[in-house]
Amino acid sequence: MADLIIKNAYILTMDPEAGDIKNGVVVVEDGKIKEVGTSTECTAKKVIDAKGSVLMPGLVNTHCHAGMTIFRGYADDMQLQDWLENHIWPAEAKLTDDDIYAGTRLACLEMIRSGTIAFADMYIHENRVAQAVDEAGIRAALSYGMIDFGDKEKADKELEVGSAFVKEWNGKAGGRIITMYGPHAPNTCSRDFLIRVKEQAVRDNVKLHIHVLETEAELNYMKENFGMCSIHFLKGIDFWGTDVLAAHCVWLSDGDIKILAEYGVNISHNPNSNMKLASGICPVTKLIDAGANVCLGTDGCASNNNLDMFEEMRSAALLQKVSVMDPTVLPARKVLEMATVNGAKALGINSGMLKEGYNADMIIIDMNKAHLAPVYDVASHLVYAASGKDVRTTIVAGKVLMDDGKVLSMDEQEVIDIAIKASKDLLGRIGN
Ligand SMILES: N[C@@H](CCSC[C@H]1O[C@@H](n2cnc3c(=O)[nH]cnc32)[C@H](O)[C@@H]1O)C(=O)O
Ligand SMILES: [Zn+2]
């Protein structure tokens, strides 16, 4: 007997061979997809009738600082450097591991509610992030964010913490957690430190998660200090490879784009964060045309300010169209691919498609809504009309985490209340 059957769904498999399936059926067993088709002989412990709904792979958020939900709306409308140096970093210094746990639980709740089944994180007290992920039932690629500012002692300490985290949590939560190394950025990590981290990641056979060329300020800093941009600098220390997830990649030359594509780098495009911080516009179309793997991320809640990947898909499509003054770029299906297939590839997880043998990481979107009627093209609605609020069911590793709008893996009000209390206590500690 299978664990779960979903029937009568309009299925977006995201599998180029299977395409869309009308009145489709998916059978789930032991956390994996057992069958995808139009009928099945199987029976199951639980059957979901998805009539009038769309079933698709869940969304993959490839750049986040989940615990920063605690800072949602804390510091808006300022430049990145001012925001980081004068507001966020001083506040982060007062964060406790309980704050991070509370903030990450809130992030997991928000992501489960809005159809995200996996996210890539880079933050502090990452062991408490992992604990929250384990309990919430979501999938995640987690890294302890490391900064050395050229201080050898800090570098040693950061790598010790980052390495211990990688080893302790890789593969945990029934395989839902994978770990990465998280060197923060080329202008906050020294050359030697970046070399050491890359070597350690290769030895540990895990990927790397780094911010790259989010702002023109980083580009200028790298040119002044190293005589070259971050892309050429990282190439010079053999940093690039398919094991790298680079967030932002806004300030790129055509030569940089060629390098990123050539090395198979995974690029996490964060349109809402880039717009909110006025960081710039990532040349997504050029990167895709060059063959790079471009996926989508929200960044932290303090620079978005939510974790709704449907909003991120819409922003990515609209921002790119107006930035190149061509409405034909980034069509809906391409954006859906970025948020599912490409995101899964970037994290190295077997999700992102509804295909036999893949992780049963999927979502059901209720299409019986005024703002989703009538339906000519499902993909169009998912990108240009829907939001995370239209997700009714979220399944990760075959487990139903939200069933018809009710979150089953956590007490929603308790999670919200604890996060609000943590933010109030934090304000008291920050003293404003
Ligand atoms: N161990 C490090 C912490 C790094 S965690 C990841 C860092 O990225 C910061 N961060 C959040 N959003 C952004 C962004 O958009 N660009 C760059 N850094 C960010 C976040 O505030 C956090 O300090 C230290 O010693 O500071
Ligand atoms: Zn970030």
Image (cartoon, rainbow, N blue to C red):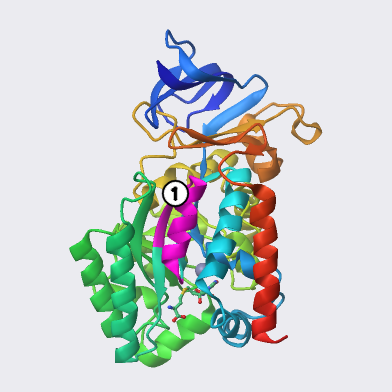
In this rendering, is residue 167 above or below 79? above
Can you give x and y, in whole percent of width and height, for residue 203 in the image?
A: 18, 64
- Residue found 67% across the figure and 36% down from its top: 405
Closer-to-camera residue (125/226): 125
Query: 10 Å neighbourhood of mark 1: few (<14), some, or many (≥20)?
Result: many
Residue under circle 1? 343
Closer-to-camera residue (335/408): 408
Quadrant placement of the N terminus: top left
- Residue found 39% across the figure and 54% down from its top: 292
In this rendering, is residue 335 above or below 283? above
Number of callouts? 1
Can see residue 299? no
**Residue 204, image quadrant:** bottom left
Can see residue 53? yes
Identify the secondary structure beneath mark 1.
Answer: helix
- Residue found 39% across the figure and 32% down from its top: 31
Can you give x and y, in whole percent of width and height, for residue 391 in the image?
A: 65, 38
In this rendering, is residue 264 above or below 51? below
- Residue found 61% across the figure and 22% down from its top: 50
Q: Is residue 133 magenta?
A: yes
Task: Pick out the residue farthest to the right.
Answer: 370
- Is the CB atom of the residue marked by disc 1 within 8 angstroms of ligand 2's nearest atom? no
Closer-to-camera residue (324/232): 232
Give the left or right position of residue 270, taking residue 31 as reference.
right
Can you give x and y, in whole percent of width and height, for residue 36 in the image?
A: 43, 21
Amino acid type at circle 1 is Gly
In this rendering, is residue 357 above or below 346? above
Quadrant placement of the C terminus: bottom right
Q: Is residue 51 magenta?
A: no
Closer-to-camera residue (368/412): 412
State which region is magenta.
124-142
**Residue 226, image quadrant:** bottom left
